Image: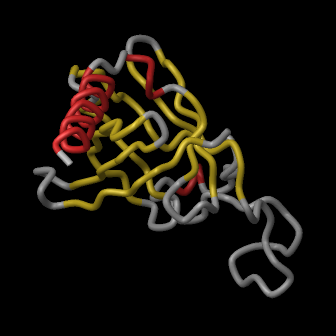
Amino acid sequence: MRLIHYLVLLLTIAVLCATAWADNDDILGTWFNQDKDAKIEIFKCGNDYCGKIVWLKNPTYSADSKEGTPGTPKLDTKNPDAAKRKTPLLDLQIVQGLQFSGDNQWKNGKIYDPDSGKTYSSKATLASHDQLDLRGYVGMSMFGRTEKWTRAN
């Protein structure tokens, strides 16, 4: 019994050490959003990290759509800038300006929600190699929402 406790303790320490040593670029790659209806590619943009939509489960308007012409690519129709409302959602940059701050965290970013047309301050935490906790908020981070993104293979 004592050996089991010792092994569990060692395993816990190993996991904590592995996640504590995340590199700046560990966030890079393609991630499913929480609903798994979109994939977002996180990439370097200068010294920061950005993200764009690279896959949608339903990339075109359905036959019964009231938002757009059926069969055509979905557009950023809720954008507050009328000139951008005809921009396709595919390849739309929704994350910008995340900066690695150490300790598995990226801060000072912005995230755009095409479902509402709103942009929020954001930060991200790499909870594990395959889970990214992305928080969007207004003002202070306590006034926001966290989504759990999973790495897409």
Dividing the picture into quadrants, the one containing residue 3 is top left
Number of marks present in the image shown? 0
16 w.r.t. 118: above or below: above
Dividing the picture into quadrants, the one containing residue 71 is bottom right
Residue at the (45%, 33%) spot, across then down: 129
Residue at the (29%, 50%) spot, across then down: 135
Along the line of sight, the residue nearer the viewer: 70 or 35: 35
Give coordinates of residue 105: x percent, y percent: 26, 30
35 w.r.t. 100: above or below: below
Give coordinates of residue 88: x percent, y percent: 70, 51
61 w.r.t. 53: above or below: below
Residue farthest bottom in this picture = 64
Along the line of sight, the residue nearer the viewer: 51 or 105: 105
Tell me if 115 is positioned left or right of 14 in this view: right
Residue farthest top in this picture = 47
Along the line of sight, the residue nearer the viewer: 14 or 151: 14
Residue at the (34%, 21%) spot, across then down: 22
Along the line of sight, the residue nearer the viewer: 140 or 13: 13
The way the protein has been coloured in the rendering is secondary structure
Tell me if 110 is positioned left or right of 150 in this view: left
Give coordinates of residue 76: x percent, y percent: 61, 58
Dividing the picture into quadrants, the one containing residue 153 is top right
Give coordinates of residue 66: x percent, y percent: 71, 84
